């Protein structure tokens, strides 16, 4: 009888232990917070974000990233303002546009991802040597008016003595997602494209990269993570966790080779060959496109507004501290 009681007690203890473990696992699962992130496009230009996802840096912080591609800055900002996403990865200029419209709940930049333009000038013809004057008098397929790619494109052209509105047949009314297809179908002699599309076109003989807008534009907060001010106040802890994971990813990208980065993010780019992926990442690393930390400083903010002013898109200068939260990034970097 005593043996039966002992066996029963052991079985009972095992059941409670299992239940406790299950409860603990469920508790851990419940602690994982879902963060909806809208990216303006899906590009190797955003490699550090994908490294953070695939290497588990966000997961380590208790965050599950629900990544959505919201093609185009206007659509991405609409998704953020309407509550469709929590965090937007988009050009910093969009936060200024929202500010200019008198938003009661301003959009705040809290972590920088890229620090140069990520587009390249692609020529339909293979040129032995390229001169910016080659763009004069021909059809130039640019990006959406008011968007960061288009403004940087205009800034670089003007810097090289070309007025895009007078010296070229400028097309900028095609939806962001359709620009590559329009060029592939025969529209334009030159086009401004992101990677990996530019390199894929080059490999297929549809176009040839002749210049980098990133090399020409200087350091600028090209793409940043931003959220509504109300979100940052309500869930500051989540923003800090997100930024901490991002910083780990940025440091990882900075200290690893293009081949290692390509291997890490390959699950998110199954339709892109490894040779193209490596080439693109190598190109972006070489021109220092990937920010090595999430801090968006005042000088970069100033350069952004210089470019916007040149494009005629800035009504009034906006102070750095009005739309940029540096405290989160600074606290993450110091730890």
Image (cartoon, rainbow, N blue to C red):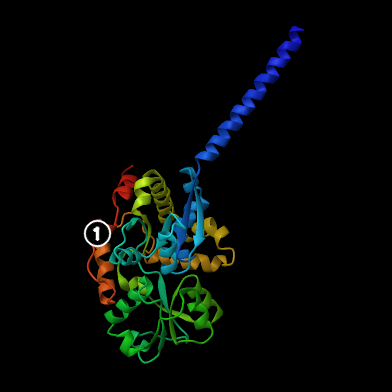
Q: Residue at x 68, y 17 (%)?
A: 10
Q: Is residue 46 left or right of residue 276?
A: left
Q: Please say if 246 is above or below 44.
A: above
SS category of the residue bearing label 1? helix
Q: Residue at x 76, y 12 (%)?
A: 4
Q: Position of residue 117 (x, y in %)?
A: 37, 69
Total number of numbered discs in the rendering: 1
Q: Position of residue 263 (x, y in %)?
A: 54, 57
Viewport quadrant of the C terminus: top left
Viewport quadrant of the N terminus: top right
> In front: 280, or 39?
39
Q: Is residue 237 left or right of residue 43?
A: left
Q: Position of residue 20 (x, y in %)?
A: 59, 27
Residue, disc 1 = 320
Q: Is residue 39 left or right of residue 291?
A: right
Q: Please say if 23 is above or below 52.
A: above
Q: Residue at x 39, y 65 (%)?
A: 286
- Graded by Cα atoms within 10 Å as few (under 14), some (14 to 19) or many (20 or more), the crowding at tag 1 reads some
> In front: 203, or 307?
307
Q: Residue furthest bottom?
A: 137
> In front: 242, or 300?
242
Q: Position of residue 121 (x, y in %)?
A: 41, 79
Q: Residue at x 48, y 43 (%)?
A: 62
Quadrant in the rendering for residue 78: bottom left
Q: Please say if 66 is above or below 14.
A: below
């Amino acid at each position: 009888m005593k043996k039966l009681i002992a066996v029963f007690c052991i079985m009972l203890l095992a059941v409670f232990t299992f239940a406790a473990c299950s409860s603990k696992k469920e508790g851990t699962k419940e602690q994982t917070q879902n963060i909806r992130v809208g990216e303006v496009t899906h590009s190797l230009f955003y490699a550090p974000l994908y490294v953070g996802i695939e290497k588990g840096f966000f997961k380590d912080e208790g965050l599950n990233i629900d990544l959505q591609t919201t093609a185009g800055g206007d659509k991405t900002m609409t998704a953020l303002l309407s509550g469709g996403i929590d965090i937007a990865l988009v050009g910093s200029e969009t936060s200024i546009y929202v500010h200019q419209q008198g938003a009661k709940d301003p959009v705040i930049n809290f972590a920088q991802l890229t620090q140069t333009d990520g587009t390249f000038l692609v020529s339909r013809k293979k040129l032995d040597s390229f001169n910016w004057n080659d763009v004069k008098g021909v059809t130039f397929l640019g990006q959406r008016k008011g968007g960061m790619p288009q403004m940087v494109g205009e800034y670089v052209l003007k810097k090289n003595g070309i007025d895009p509105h007078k010296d070229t047949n400028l097309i900028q009314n095609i939806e962001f997602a359709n620009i590559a297809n329009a060029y592939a179908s025969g529209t334009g002699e030159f086009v401004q494209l992101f990677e990996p599309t530019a390199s894929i076109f080059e490999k297929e003989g549809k176009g040839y990269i002749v210049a980098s807008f990133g090399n020409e534009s200087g350091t600028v907060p090209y793409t940043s993570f931003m959220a509504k001010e109300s979100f940052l106040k309500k869930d500051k802890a989540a923003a800090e966790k997100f930024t901490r994971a991002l910083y780990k990813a940025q440091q990882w990208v900075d200290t690893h080779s293009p081949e290692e980065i390509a291997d890490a993010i390959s699950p998110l780019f199954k339709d892109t060959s490894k040779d193209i992926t490596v080439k693109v990442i190598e190109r972006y690393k070489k021109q220092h496109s990937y920010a090595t930390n999430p801090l968006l400083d005042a000088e970069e903010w100033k350069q952004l507004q210089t470019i916007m002013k040149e494009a005629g898109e800035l009504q009034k200068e906006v102070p750095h501290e009005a739309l940029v939260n540096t405290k989160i990034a600074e606290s993450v970097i110091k730890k």
